[in-house]
Image: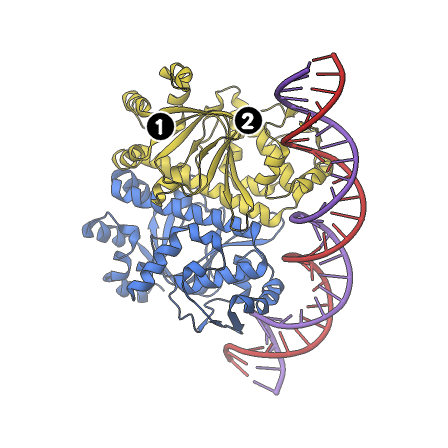
Chain colours: A blue, B yellow, C purple, D red
DNA sequence: CGTCATCTTGAGGAGTGTCAATAACTGTGG
DNA sequence: CCACAGTTATTGACACTCCTCAAGATGACG
């Protein structure tokens, strides 16, 4: 019995997956036809999902768990590009780049379940289906801008500012309770994501008091969370993201994967 | 008589523009129909082409000259995102993001001639024409990866390494003579593009000797330019870009705008 | 209760940014 | 052609942030 079998039934009626923005522009039949081709795979903590440079065959929907995307630089350092959670899509960019290989490593940080879908389907559907193509273009463009803004942050903000900005985004994106929530990943991973050393992150945390943020262990508390306009990082005000998420917060509860202004992909 | 009239005739038979990779997948008639809608505009040194936050109506083909794309951060700093030259395309990403505003400022660094084309055409054509959409997806994806690699560089390389990497790319991209060429833009602009102060750039230049690069004033000389495999920055080896450009160099002469592995856009 | 991983805290140093003074270059008008 | 002003680049001194190395502290889990 294949180790993935246990998960298959959950996806036989995958409202979760069907509801993803990623599939905007597809009919229910098209979605089901695709999902039949999907391979559900589960990964343990630390297990490699794919490796930078490996031949690229699939793209991935994250079904549950947490996945770290990172690259190794020639001098042996590790740069975390992104931390993916349920509803995120990975490897879209690589496929359209036509490089034929994965541009990064992906490993499960927490036990993860993903669905692997063939790249051919993506290329063909993008060419055939104009609405789907526009959705992709929008998503890739937004993601590209996010990376750009991120780089801008790294270049212009101090470590405490970067951390504060990260925590505010984290809270908004996952719709956590601003008055108290737990970090969903290790501090090491956060530090890596922010391009700093753990020691620097550690020293930055006490300095967050002056932004009204208290961190004790894994617990984060915002003294005051009046709205995203008051974001530490004025840069982010240019981003559609913030406004969209704010709107979502007002609307109230939705599935996590639906609370995105667009689907995320990497 | 409008000040742009002088340029119109040059574009009546614009082999240059028609040959851009950007138009892959379009018939000659489609191209001509589009180009008729295009407004040719010329800008003097320092003149603003569009401003961050302005309502977004057009995308732009750079016909000649040099254009700086930059953003102003809330604390008043200026971050140069890119330096565009003939054949480059600007504002594609903004259009698909559907943000409705320009995400950056564009000013002419050297006298520039650009063609402004309506964003509606882009959205409609991307939806209608699958081949064109794939080209766009590929270009945006590549550009997104380039930004990502750039950020990785900033995070992991020293100022001299960044400068060396930049000069090598510059030489390859413009097909300059490695044994001696002049910087096409000011050092201030280069420093800004590399996210460093001009003093840091100035101090980095003498340190380039150990990479076999000599810079005197505006003149750059590579002692030894054995091929892009020997690139200062091993990071870049993962990029299709380098390999593609190397192939182009071997093939010999081509129009500058054709020597791209894909069209560039921002 | 020990083991391992994760995190905190300290001391020291490398690399850049900042400020300021000077030098080189560019273009303009006499 | 030269003199001038304005821009652009170089160089020095200093401060600051963050990285590095090292030693403990805390927490998770068998």
Tell me: A8 left or right of B203.
left
Q: Is residue C11 above or below residue A72?
A: below
Q: Is residue A264 above or below residue B38?
A: below
Q: Is residue A186 above or below residue B213?
A: below
Q: Which residue is mark 2?
A: B174
Tags 2 and 1 both on a single chain: yes
Query: What is the x, y in percent for residue A157?
Result: 56, 54
* Residue at x-position 27% and y-position 51%: A23
Q: Neighbour class for label 1 at 10 Å: few (<14), some, many (≥20)?
A: some
Q: Neighbour class for label 2 at 10 Å: few (<14), some, many (≥20)?
A: some
* Residue A266 visible from this viewpoint: yes
Tell me the CA gap for discs 2 and 1. 22 Å
Tell me: B29 left or right of A205.
left
* Residue at x-position 41% and y-position 60%: A228
Q: Which residue is mark 1?
A: B24
Q: Earlier in the sequence, mark 2 or mark 1?
A: 1
SS at circle 2: loop
Query: What is the x, y in percent for residue A30?
Result: 21, 49
Query: What is the x, y in percent for residue B26?
Result: 31, 26
- Marks 2 and 1 close (CB-CB < 8 Å): no
């Amino acid at each position: 019995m294949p180790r993935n079998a246990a998960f298959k039934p959950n996806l036989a009626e995958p409202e979760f997956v069907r509801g993803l923005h990623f599939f905007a522009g597809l009919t229910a039949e098209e979605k089901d036809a695709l999902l039949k081709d999907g391979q559900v795979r589960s990964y343990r903590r630390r297990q490699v999902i794919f490796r930078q440079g490996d031949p690229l065959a699939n793209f991935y929907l994250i079904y549950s768990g947490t996945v770290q995307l990172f690259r190794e630089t020639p001098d042996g350092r590790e740069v975390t590009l992104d931390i993916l959670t349920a509803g995120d899509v990975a490897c879209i960019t690589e496929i359209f780049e036509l490089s034929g290989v994965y541009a990064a490593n992906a490993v499960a940080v927490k036990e993860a379940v993903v669905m692997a879908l063939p790249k051919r389907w993506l290329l063909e559907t993008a060419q055939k289906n104009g609405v789907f193509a526009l959705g992709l273009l929008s998503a890739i463009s937004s993601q590209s801008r996010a990376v750009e803004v991120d780089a801008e942050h790294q270049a212009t903000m101090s470590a405490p500012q970067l951390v504060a900005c990260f925590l505010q985004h984290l809270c908004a994106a996952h719709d956590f309770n601003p008055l108290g929530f737990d970090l969903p990943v290790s501090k090491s991973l956060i530090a890596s994501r922010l391009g700093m050393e753990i020691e620097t992150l550690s020293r930055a945390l006490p300095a967050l008091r002056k932004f009204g943020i208290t961190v004790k262990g894994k617990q984060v508390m915002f003294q005051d969370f009046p709205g995203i306009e008051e974001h530490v990082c004025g840069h982010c005000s240019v981003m559609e993201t913030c406004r969209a998420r704010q709107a979502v917060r007002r609307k109230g509860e939705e599935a996590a994967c639906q609370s995105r202004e667009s689907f995320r992909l990497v």
